[in-house]
Image (spheres, grey):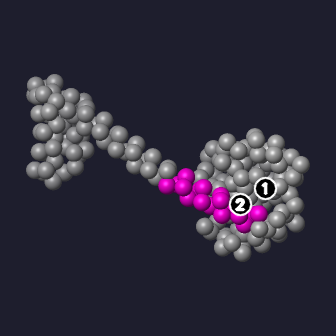
Amino acid sequence: MERALIVSGSEKGIEAVSGILRSSGYSQITAIKSGSEARRLINITDYELIVINTPIADEFGHELSIMIAESSTAGIMLICKSDIADDVSDKVGEFGICVIPKPLNKAMFHQSLKLVEATRSRMLGLKKENVRLLTKIDELRLINRAKCALMEYLKLTEPQAHRYIEKQAMDTRQTRKEVAISILSTYGR
């Protein structure tokens, strides 16, 4: 992990969090003070970790953390006063946001950081698998449409249409998807 964004209303908070992040291997740390600036930066740069030290200049910060969780794959840590940490955690927990109570305990912060990194890594793996499966589903739909076209226009049975697509793919050294696209363009579907 390299890029981290710190959103904090106080310089002291920025210094404390950036020191811990540097010692954890983050080399590109950006620090800002407002939620509106964070929203702008998130649209421009892809961060691996975002730490929000509440309250920030223009809002408390939990709304910002939810927005980030819904629109990015960054790991998110929300730091807030210990007396409200449980309430805030109830609001943002379902979005996968880690809430850490103030005052900061370095050992607890490091442990939470490792947990956020592991969770983000797992989430990215699941996202990659989801994209792969959606691509496979789209390919199967395309092939099934081609089979239907063969069944309608050439009066083939479903097993015959399947065999036709498989044989064409082998004979022409194309994928079944490429053969299906060719069939669909031939029969205007």
How many badges with numbers are in the image? 2
Toward the viewer: 182 or 20?
20
Toward the viewer: 143 or 43?
143
Inter-mark Cα distance, 1 to 2: 8 Å
**From what the image shows, is residue 173 above or below residue 133?**
below
Most prominent secondary structure in the magenta stretch? helix
Magenta segment: 108-125
N-terminal of the two: label 1 or label 2? Answer: 1
Instruction: Say left or right for 10 vs 69.
Output: right
Residue 33 in view here: no
Instruction: Say left or right for 66 vs 127.
Output: right
Instruction: Say left or right for 98 vs 56.
Output: left
Q: What residue type is labelled 1?
A: Ile
**From what the image shows, is residue 34 above or below residue 70?**
below
Residue 74 in view here: yes
Toward the viewer: 115 or 151?
115
Locate residue 32: give its quadrant: bottom right
Residue 152 position, x and y percent, is: 16, 24
Q: Which amino acid does label 2 sit on?
A: Ser
The residue pinned by badge 1 equals: 100
Look at 34% across and 44% down and name the residue there: 136
Residue 164 position, x and y percent, is: 12, 39
Residue 59 position, x and y percent, is: 83, 46
* Circle number at residue 112: 2
Locate residue 93: give its quadrant: top right
